[in-house]
Amino acid sequence: MRFFAFVFLLLPSIAIADDITPDSFANRLKADALKLTVSSVLVQSQTLYMQGTPMGDPEPLPARISYTIENNSGIPLGMAIKRTGVTAGPCAEVESGSGIELFDDALAVQLQRNKSFRDRVLRLVPDKGRVSGTIMMEKWGCKPSDVTGMTTVPVTITVVIANENNFLAVPLQTDAHLTVRGN
């Protein structure tokens, strides 16, 4: 129960800008300032056999989300992806990613308060710029049986954006085509 209380204490500092005046960072962003495009969500039932054990232990291949985020905000933005803010239908546990740095909730306060850390972690995306990458879901947490009968899935990727001393978490959502590959 204490864990949930701690999480709820962090959420307001992550999701809400400190300054909500008409000229604040959150209010200057248009509704279409950031655009998420997901080219594919791939869930595989294939397994990889690890060497070094007598029979080779089967390891499932992780599901993948291939994405592009476009910055149409009018200003350059530093971006990172909140690891616990990524979902693809019923799949929600992230293992790794490329394109934009993933961060855990424990680093959220450090990202918000420490500008030098933020400058190292956040990827600068200029206005009208794009960044593409792949998010690998946890290999045991997203199986073909979890998405049986689905042809599309809703995808949410929560990005943390920053411009100078301004910091904001923005959930981006879209529907994506689902591909399931089997053995």
Image: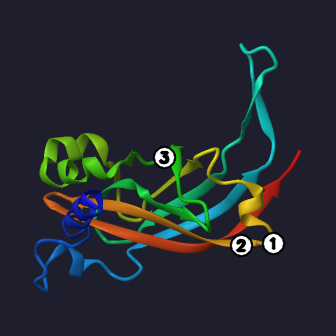
Q: Residues within 10 Å of mark 3 (few under 14, many from 20)?
A: some
Quadrant into which the C terminus falls: top right
Residue 180 appears in which quarter of the rendering?
A: bottom right
Q: Residues within 10 Å of mark 2 (few under 14, many from 20)?
A: some
- Residue 141, compared with residue 173, is above or below; it is above
Q: Which residue of the protein is positioned furthest toward the bottom in this rendering?
A: 22
Distance in Å between CA atoms under marks 2 and 3: 23 Å
Task: Identify residue type, mark 1.
Answer: Gly
Q: Nearer the viewer, residue 30 or 17?
A: 17
Task: Identify residue type, mark 3.
Answer: Gly
Q: Could you say which disc has been placed on residue 152 in the image?
A: 2
Q: Position of residue 131 (x, y in %)?
A: 48, 54
Q: Is residue 123 left or right of residue 108?
A: right
Q: Residues within 10 Å of mark 1 (few under 14, many from 20)?
A: few
Question: Mark 1 and mark 2 in contact (Cβ < 8 Å)?
Answer: no
Q: Is residue 155 left or right of residue 161?
A: right
- At x 18%, y 72%, the residue is 17
Distance in Å between CA atoms under marks 2 and 1: 9 Å
Q: Which residue of the protein is positioned furthest toward the front in this rendering?
A: 1
- Residue 182, compared with residue 177, is above or below; it is above
User: Number of numbered discs present?
Assistant: 3
Q: Secondary structure at mark 2?
A: strand
Q: Position of residue 160 (x, y in %)?
A: 32, 60
Which residue carries the number 3 mark? Answer: 99
Which residue carries the number 1 mark? Answer: 149
Name the mark nearer the viewer: 1 or 3: 1
Distance in Å between CA atoms under marks 1 and 3: 30 Å
Q: Is residue 19 left or right of residue 96?
A: left
Q: Secondary structure at mark 3?
A: loop
- At x 79%, y 67%, the residue is 148
Quadrant into which the N terminus falls: bottom left
Q: Nearer the viewer, residue 87 or 174?
A: 87
